[in-house]
Amino acid sequence: MIDFDPFGKPLKDVELEDLDRLSEENVSEGTYIEYKRRFPDSQSIAKVIASFANTHGGYFLIGLAEEDLTNIASGQIGVNVEEYPNPKETIRNIVRDHLNPSPNFTSRVIRRPDYDDYVIVLIEVPESHNAPHIHSSGKIYTRTGEGSDPISPETDRWTLDKLYERRNEWNERVQQFCHPDITLTRGQSGETEHQADGWPFLEIYGVPSTLGDPICAEVLDDIEGFKSILEQSELVLPEFDDVETDEETAEGSLGMGRTYAAYRSSSDAVVAQQWFQEEDSGRIDTASAPETVKFFDDGGLKALLAVPKLSFPEPAYGAWSALDQSVDGNVDYIRFLDGGTLLLNTFVLLNSYLNLLDEYSWMDNATRELHFKARIRNGNRTVLMFESEWFSDLIEEFGPPISYEDVVEIPRTGTRILYHEEGSEFSALLRCLTLIMEGFGLPWERRDRGTQELWDLIFEMGDFESERDTY
């Protein structure tokens, strides 16, 4: 996290008067802050952002003047939006094109009320766990006093080694976190008399940049709040390009959640567990596949979700018939999983998780980077089944999506970003679900399917029609 905080509030809440206090309190440029009167060139912007990410994090404020001798903020000038109509997008493109890997950052634009055509651009860059970030010039910049200076790998090997050591330590911590610390049941491990292969289940991990820092510790004394969010979590529907929602729905929210049988608190987490799961073959008891959700005081998440099974219908119909024909009737060796229910349950869980982070102030911290990891276990000879026309078309085009892998890592290596900027939550949830579908062998992206179709499927499974009509 950034040790220096010039505003005493999250960047999203900073206003013009907060910028005026920088001058009043004689805040000068230094290790954690830099001012620019005008919008710099692309190379310079990338250099400053990289230097903050590679060092201890900091704030880059564009449109603020500074005194020549003291480098203290001296007044608001602003960036001309006629010349730079979308400064936030411009900065994102610069970071993407000039830094490898691209560091996490948050930006905010504040309009000057006295000059409508001028804005102040605020960029908050946390210390990166993925350093070093290499500039397109081939140089590695770090922060030295009020400047961004390149390091020489030949003469400053110590600094370079420290950057790689930071990355390796973080990757090791993430790897250690992304394993269940809950003992698997006999059903999950395949030790029951009638289930030699083990019940298929999904591991889900939310890995926050605050791993090990108990910034959400208040949840440990708020079991009722934890329970309420899981059972009554709301989904805010933002407007975004590839998902169509009517205006009233987009501005409202849909209630969704899951009820668990037991809730408890441990020394560093709160836990919810579901002892039974309903499926068409009857209830699964606790010896087989309990659902467990564990929310940690540092904002981390560990969850085990049982994957509901389906029985092959007689006679076969719709997508079942298409699959039966594609395997020449050899369905006895295949285990069929309820894809729609799995997607809905996973979506509800991840949405509740983001709401937990928001409720317990995780999203107000300086880093705000959250990664996603999942793992399918006992997935050998399984088909994630959907009773729909598009699934029949998929079988005819690609063949039956039968998984022959017992354990599938999602993504195959590392983690995938879930959240780092306000407003990206809904699209991020759908991207995670797409990864899970592909993990089960469904070529979703390769069929050019967008988030609209995936959202329609989830909405249909959730039976949210009455809620949709309300908003």
Image (cartoon, rainbow, N blue to C red):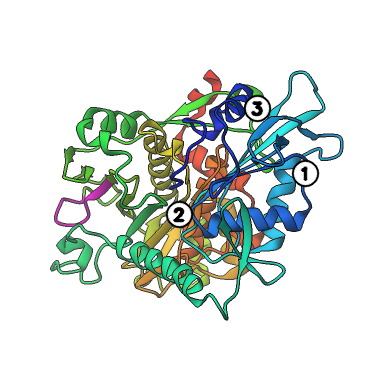
Residue at image position (39%, 63%) is 170
Residue extending farthest right:
82
Disc 1 to disc 3, how far (Cα)? Answer: 38 Å
Foreground residue, 254 or 338?
254
Image quadrant in which the C terminus is located? top right
What's the magenta region? Answer: 284-294
**Frontmost residue, 105 versus 329:** 105
Q: How many marks?
A: 3
Q: Residue at x 52, y 63 (%)?
A: 442
Task: Describe the element under mark 3 as helix, strand or loop.
Answer: loop
N-term-proximal mark, 2 vs 3: 3
Residue type of the residue flagged with mark 2: His
Asked whether residue 47 is drawn in magenta, I would say no
Question: Compared to 408, does 76 lie above or below?
Answer: above
Residue 78: % across, % down: 76, 32
Q: Which mark is residue 246?
A: 3
Mark 3: few/some/many CA within 10 Å (<14, 14-19, 20+): few
- Which of the marked residues, 2 or 1, is nearer the chain's N terminus? 1
In the image, residue 325 lies at what x, y percent? 51, 69
Q: Position of residue 137 (x, y in %)?
A: 72, 69
- Residue designated by label 1: 39
Q: From what the image shows, is residue 325 above or below residue 293? A: below
Residue 43 in view here: yes
Secondary-structure class at tag 1: loop
The answer to whether one can see residue 382 in this image is no
Q: Main SS type for the magenta part?
A: loop
Which amino acid, mark 1?
Phe
Q: Which residue is mark 2?
A: 371
Q: Quadrant of residue 216?
A: top left
Residue 288 covered by magenta stretch = yes
